[in-house]
């Protein structure tokens, strides 16, 4: 019987190795990715059955990568394995179509179950936060009413937000996104205006508190 094909994405090699060791007996690990942009490239090329990804990855966070892959027609099932125990992260993940949300502290006990459930098209949430997540989802009939401010940005503005907060210069961001530095500047000031932020330092702090980047 052919094994389901799995792609692992996390910016820490040891974490990827740990997940690989947990899954390799029953699944074919087709590739690994160390950042969100590599994840998109590899997933588009290899078309795995399931993608296991962290949220806080460099260049492009895991949730944004999921959105982009779905827009590209990726049919893989998605599981997030993350350090973020905040309910808002899990709610956001489920709303964009992630089927599994596992905390890293529980991954050794829960990842295999989450993979089984996701491949069957069922949702799996770490039990310690599952009840609160479901209450949050059912208690908000209008998803836009409690939408994160960053989600009111365009996809391009969210990309620029993360890259600026990571300390990349305008020219570097332009090369990464394949747009001109002037266009990067325009996106930066548009997103700062929407978020009511005045400085790059405030923007960076915002990105850290929202889990878009990991503090240095």
Image: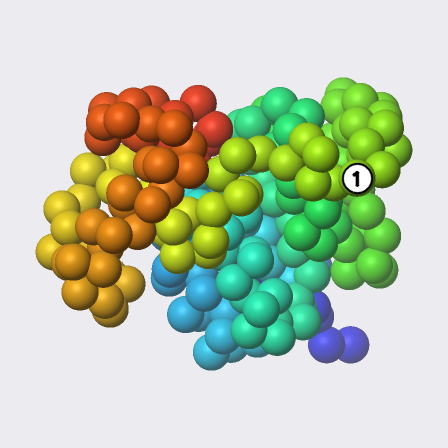
Residue 203 or residue 67, whichever sits in front: 203
Quadrant showing the C terminus: top left
**Percent x, y for residue 146?**
68, 31
Task: Provide residue 19's location: percent of width, then percent of height.
Answer: 55, 45
Q: Is residue 175 left or right of residue 6?
A: left
Q: Residue at x 17, y 65 (%)?
A: 180
Residue at left offset 44%, top offset 69%:
42
Q: For the residue labelled by badge 1, is the local secondary structure a helix, a strand or a loop?
A: loop
> Which corner quadrant of the image does residue 101 belong to?
top right
Residue sitting at x 44%, y 61%: 39
Q: Residue drawn at (38%, 50%), measured in percent from left and top?
A: 157
| Circle 1 residue | 142
- Residue 63 horizontal side relative to residue 126, left or right: left
Q: Residues within 10 Å of mark 1 (few under 14, many from 20)?
A: few
Residue 156 drawn at (x, y percent): 39, 57
| Residue 149 place in picture, x, y as percent | 53, 34
**Would you place residue 209 above or below residue 56 in this image?**
above
Asked whether residue 25 appears in the rendered view, the answer is: no
Q: How many marks?
A: 1
State the residue in front, 96 or 190: 190
Note whether residue 4 is visible: yes
Q: Quadrant of residue 179?
A: bottom left
Of the 4 image quadrants, the one containing the N terminus is bottom right
Does 27 appear above or below 149?
A: below
Residue 50 against residue 60 in the figure, above or below: below
Q: Is residue 129 left or right of residue 68?
A: right
The figure's colour scheme reads rainbow
């Amino acid at each position: 019987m052919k094994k389901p094909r799995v792609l692992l994405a996390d910016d820490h090699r040891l974490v990827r190795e740990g997940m690989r060791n947990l899954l390799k007996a029953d699944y074919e690990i087709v590739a690994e990715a160390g950042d969100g942009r590599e994840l998109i490239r590899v997933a588009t090329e290899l078309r795995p059955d399931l993608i296991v990804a962290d949220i806080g990855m460099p260049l492009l966070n895991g949730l944004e990568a999921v959105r982009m892959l779905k827009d590209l027609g990726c049919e893989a099932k998605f599981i997030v394995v993350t350090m973020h125990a905040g309910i808002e992260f899990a709610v956001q993940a489920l709303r964009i179509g992630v089927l599994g949300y596992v905390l890293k502290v529980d991954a050794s006990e829960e990842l295999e179950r989450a993979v089984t459930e996701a491949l069957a098209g069922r949702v799996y949430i770490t039990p310690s936060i599952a009840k609160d997540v479901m209450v949050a989802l059912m208690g908000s009939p209008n998803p836009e009413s409690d939408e994160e401010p960053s989600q009111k940005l365009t996809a391009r503005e969210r990309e620029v937000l993360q890259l600026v907060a990571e300390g990349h210069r305008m020219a570097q961001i332009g090369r990464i996104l394949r747009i001109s530095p002037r266009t990067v500047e325009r996106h930066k000031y548009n997103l700062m205006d929407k978020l009511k932020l005045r400085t790059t330092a405030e923007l960076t702090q915002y990105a850290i508190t929202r889990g878009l980047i990991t503090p240095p």
